[in-house]
Image (cartoon, rainbow, N blue to C red):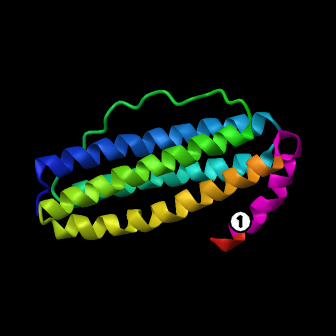
């Protein structure tokens, strides 16, 4: 099987976005680390690793599907933040955008009747539901706590990790 040029190009663009997300989450983790939020930092370092793994999953698929991997340039991520709530707001916006991007890839695969790619993308569709929900929940908690009580979020994170 060989990917169409349109799907190949769209997946390559997604590879770049996944690597970009990994860098963004790394910057957020560093912000949390530098502000003495070790569990938040650990959470975002884990998110960064997951985004990198997503990029690699796409790369492996393109190779297996007979396509050509062309990783695009990745823009520099945001590196300064007002507070912890802003990091979750940014993360939620990003995950919502990624959901739209994955849905676009699904639409393209369906339009091209590329059922193998459509099936491959199912995992990402499910993953995005989890990612959006997690970031939305954490943003709501961070907002409710306010910056002066944000350290309480550190107590909530181990509970969140147990659910996975």
Q: Residue at x 58, y 52 (%)?
A: 47
Residue 148: where, in percent of width, then height? 88, 40
Using residue 103 as the reference point, say whether residue 10 is left or right of it: left
Residue depicted at x 58% and y 40%? 90
Residue 94, image x and y in percent?
50, 44
Residue 40 lies left or right of residue 55; in this view the side is right
Q: Position of residue 41 (x, y in %)?
A: 72, 46
Looking at the image, residue 133 lies above or below residue 163: above
Q: Quadrant of residue 135?
A: bottom right
Q: Is residue 30 visible?
A: yes
Dot 1 lies on which element? helix
Quarter of the image containing the C terminus?
Answer: bottom right
**Label 1: which residue?**
160
| Image: 57 above or below 28 | below
Question: Predominant secondary structure in magenta?
Answer: helix
Quadrant location of residue 114? bottom left
The N terminus appears in which quarter of the rendering? bottom left
Q: Nearer the viewer, residue 161 or 81?
A: 81
Is residue 102 found left or right of 5 in the rendered image? right
Tell me where the magenta segment starts and ends, as one range: 146-161
Residue 156, magenta (yes or no) = yes
Res. 68 visible in picture: no
Q: Nearer the viewer, residue 105 or 120?
A: 105
Local packing at callout 1 (Cα closer than 10 Å; few below 14, some 14-19, many 20+) is few
Q: Is residue 51 above or below residue 25?
A: below
Horizontal and vertical percent position of residue 34 = 77, 33
């Amino acid at each position: 099987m060989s990917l169409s040029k349109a799907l190949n190009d769209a997946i390559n663009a997604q590879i770049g976005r996944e690597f970009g997300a990994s860098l963004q989450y790394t910057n957020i983790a560093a912000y949390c680390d530098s502000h003495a939020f070790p569990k938040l930092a650990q959470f975002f370092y884990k998110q960064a690793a997951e985004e990198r793994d997503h990029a690699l999953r796409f790369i492996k698929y393109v190779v297996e599907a007979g396509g050509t991997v062309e990783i695009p340039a990745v823009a520099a991520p945001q590196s300064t933040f007002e507070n912890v709530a802003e990091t979750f707001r940014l993360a939620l916006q990003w995950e919502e955008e990624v959901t739209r991007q994955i849905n676009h890839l699904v639409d393209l695969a369906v339009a091209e009747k590329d059922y193998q790619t459509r099936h491959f993308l199912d995992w990402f569709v499910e993953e995005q539901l989890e990612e959006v929900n997690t970031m939305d929940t954490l943003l709501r908690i961070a907002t409710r706590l306010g910056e002066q009580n944000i350290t309480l979020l550190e107590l909530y994170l181990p509970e969140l990790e147990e659910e996975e």
